[in-house]
Amino acid sequence: MHTVQKSEQAAVGKLRTEQLPALADAHAHIDLLKDDGLLKESINRGVGTIVTCGVDYLTSVRALELSDYSTIFPEVGLDPENALLSGNVIDAVCELAKKNSARIVGIGEIGLDFKKAASEMEREKQREAFKSMIELGMALDKPLTVHSRDSIKEVLGILKDSGAKKVQLHYFEGDDDDARTAAELGYYISVPPLESRKRASAIKNFPIELLMTETDTPVVGKAPYYVEVSVRIVADVKGIDYYKAAEILTENTKRFFKINAGGMAGSESNIRV
Ligand SMILES: [Zn+2]
């Protein structure tokens, strides 16, 4: 359980300390979670919304299979690392997304990762895949979950030029200027459960209504309940109460991915591969 400070406990009163705030993990890889118990524990601790994504064709199918549309919601996508592997994977992922359009909440994980690209040829392959995924998301009117390691300025440029409007910058590593550009474009930033002075500075003046929390489970956080740490980071940076931060961040995630209590039309139908 997250630690609630004494003053906060006094401020929120008895009733609220007994209630767990509803939390949302806006970016996870549930297919990589080895221990099912960690997922159950996360749900028990109040994580009621988890967006799980694919990184290639098979993991995207897995994201669809793992989704229950009450807690877990899928994205389909091709990430920069897998963009380097083979030629037809772009088409395969696009087909999968189109066939299951009513069942997915977004296109992810996509983007650029120049740490993983050794040559200009590899960077070019990543750009090609990224642009195809942006086009796919825009054609299907789905939000994009974007990875941008060592490439945030170019990522922002490509997204802007493409006219993309619904963007989640996951694991944001940009500086204050990049955050300002993102805010001007109406893009969301999702905050991982890791302290970082640079990120704290970048989100300090970033609109809270464009923030989300994520774990990148199991890559960064061990399980979706690590969003408790992300919520605490946002609450501290913004100088607001933990519960208030949780409420706003969960609201933002549901709005961004169009997740509502009524579920998704089409989610009952069979997965089409
Ligand atoms: Zn990820």
Image (spheres, grey):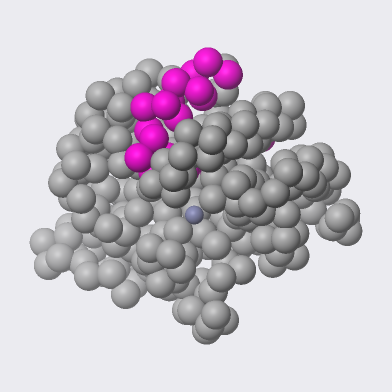
Count of numbered badges drawn on the protein: 0
Q: Is residue 131 above or below residue 265?
A: above
For residue 155, say whether it is visible: yes
Asked whether 35 or 243 is in front, the reply is 35
Q: Is residue 108 left or right of residue 218?
A: right
> Residue 59 at x, y = what percent?
67, 61
Is residue 109 in view from this perspective?
no
- Magenta stretch, residue numbers: 142-162
The one of 209 and 7 positioned closer to us in this rendering: 209
Residue 128 placement (x, y as % from top left): 62, 31
Residue at (57% x, 23% y) in the render: 164
Task: Please identify the quarter of the rendering in which residue 16 is found.
Answer: bottom left
Identified at 29% across, 35% down, the residue is 174
Tell me: residue 177, above or below residue 47.
above
Residue 152 forms part of the magenta stretch: yes
At x 49%, y 51%, the residue is 26
Q: Is residue 172 left or right of residue 269?
A: left
User: In the picture, residue 151 is in which quadrant?
Assistant: top left
The residue drawn where x is 48% and y is 34% is 120
From this view, report whether residue 126 is shown above or below residue 67. Answer: above
Q: Quadrant of the C terminus?
A: bottom right
Q: Is residue 212 above or below residue 50?
A: above
- Determine whether, in the image, residue 64 is placed left or right of residue 147: right
Of 252 and 33, which appears nearest the observer?
33
**Image x and y of residue 179, in percent:** 30, 29
Q: What is the quadrant of residue 12 in the picture?
A: bottom left
Magenta span contains residue 2 = no
Q: Quadrant of the N terminus?
A: bottom left
